[in-house]
Image: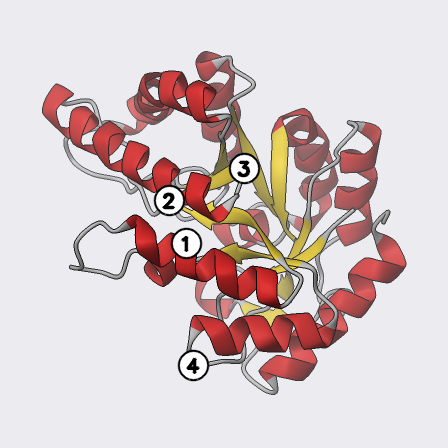
């Protein structure tokens, strides 16, 4: 089993510096952020992904996941087409990196898409992406993130409607709490999502929305062991990826999260 971290709130001003830290701290893989290989406003260029892969290989690491940064809360045909075309380009970058999973957003609320249609909209975009994902052997892991897919009913319905092994979930253990789900309800939500989970963000903390504070794994209010147990019971074989949103020593924070994962997640 691989232990990774996301290139977010982590040591290193550049991707190379981040990977140097991650490898030295004992991680063996990472989630590459889209900006690492396709900076904002830059032209699409596969060479950036090739360069990032070379950096990873020099340090004995691999890219488990690439952040997609999409918005699938779309019903307009033209908007859907733009998202699908963009996602195909992102998938090409993932292929160059060797990443098998795109951490996919659900999307953002908007007046043009009623809340009752969120799951349908997300599923429609996922279905439109499945043919090229199948050709590239890349899967989309829809994150429970933001105001849309942190609602487990929306996320589960979208995945049920997509109905494909190429469309699953990224389980962020903290985000569900951030959205407003009660701590006591999280184990049941983890269990419901577990059969769909392709990737994880193991994250701890306390509080909802503005009250949220990040914490090292095992030091917040999140029932992390319940998440691990649900995933193991569902046959999860993916990466255990740390995401730490503390504001003190980033290097120590991620190192402490890795120690928790090695002690509590099957390796």
Q: Which numbered circle lies on residue 50?
A: 1
Query: What residue lies at 59% left-to-right and 60% top-to-bottom?
Result: 57
Residue, far bottom: 249
Q: Earlier in the sequence, mark 1 or mark 4?
A: 4
Question: How packed is label 1: few (under 14 Cα within 10 Å), some, or many (20 or more)?
Answer: some
**Circle 2 — which element?**
helix
Q: Disc 3 and disc 2: Cα gap in Å? A: 11 Å
- Distance from disc 4 to disc 2, alpha carbons, whole Å, reads 22 Å
Contact flag, marks 3 and 4 (Cβ < 8 Å): no
Front residue of 121 and 139: 139
Residue that appears at 52% across and 38% down: 101
Q: Nearer the viewer, mark 1 or mark 3?
A: 1
Front in this rendered view, residue 93 or 68: 93
**First in sequence: mark 4 or mark 2?**
4
Residue 6 seen anywhere in this rendered image of the structure: no
> Where residue 207 appears, x then y in whole percent?
57, 63
Which of the two labelled residues, at mark 3 and mark 2, occupies the earlier sequence position? Answer: 2
Q: CA distance from mark 1 to mark 2?
A: 8 Å
Asked where in the image residue 75 lies, by quadrant, the reply is: top left
Which circle marks residue 100 in the picture? 3
Q: Residue at x 16, y 35 (%)?
A: 111
Q: Is residue 41 above or below residue 227?
A: below
- In the rendered structure, are the residues bearing label 4 and label 2 in contact, judged by CB atoms less than 8 Å apart? no
Q: Secondary structure at mark 1?
A: helix
- Indicate which disc, 3 or 4, sits on the residue closer to the N terminus: 4
Tell me which numbered mark, 1 or 3, is placed earlier along the sequence.
Answer: 1
Task: Determine which residue is flagged by label 2.
Answer: 93
**Residue that mark 4 sits on:** 13
């Amino acid at each position: 089993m691989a232990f990774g971290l996301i290139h977010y709130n982590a040591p290193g001003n550049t991707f190379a510096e981040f990977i140097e830290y991650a490898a030295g701290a004992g991680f063996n893989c990472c989630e590459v952020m889209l900006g690492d290989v396709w900076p904002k406003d830059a032209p699409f260029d596969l060479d950036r992904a090739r360069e990032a892969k070379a950096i990873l290989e020099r340090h004995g690491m691999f890219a488990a996941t690439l952040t997609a940064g999409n918005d699938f809360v779309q019903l307009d045909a033209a908007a859907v087409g733009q998202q699908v075309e963009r996602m195909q380009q992102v998938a090409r970058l993932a292929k160059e990196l060797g990443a098998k999973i795109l951490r996919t957003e659900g999307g953002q609320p908007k007046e043009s898409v009623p809340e009752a249609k969120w799951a349908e909209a997300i599923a429609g975009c996922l279905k439109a992406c499945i043919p090229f994902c199948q050709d590239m052997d890349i899967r989309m892991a829809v994150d429970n993130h933001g105001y849309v897919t942190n609602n487990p009913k929306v996320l589960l319905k979208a995945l049920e409607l997509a109905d494909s092994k190429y469309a699953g979930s990224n389980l962020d253990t903290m985000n569900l709490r951030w959205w407003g789900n009660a701590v006591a309800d999280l184990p049941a939500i983890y269990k419901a999502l577990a059969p769909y989970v392709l990737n994880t963000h193991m994250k701890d903390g306390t509080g909802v929305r503005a009250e949220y504070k990040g914490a090292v794994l095992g030091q917040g209010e999140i029932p992390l062991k319940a998440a691990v147990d649900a995933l193991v019971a569902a046959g999860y074989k993916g990466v255990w990826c740390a995401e730490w949103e503390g504001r003190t020593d980033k290097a120590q924070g991620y190192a402490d999260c890795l120690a928790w994962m090695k002690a509590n997640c099957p390796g």
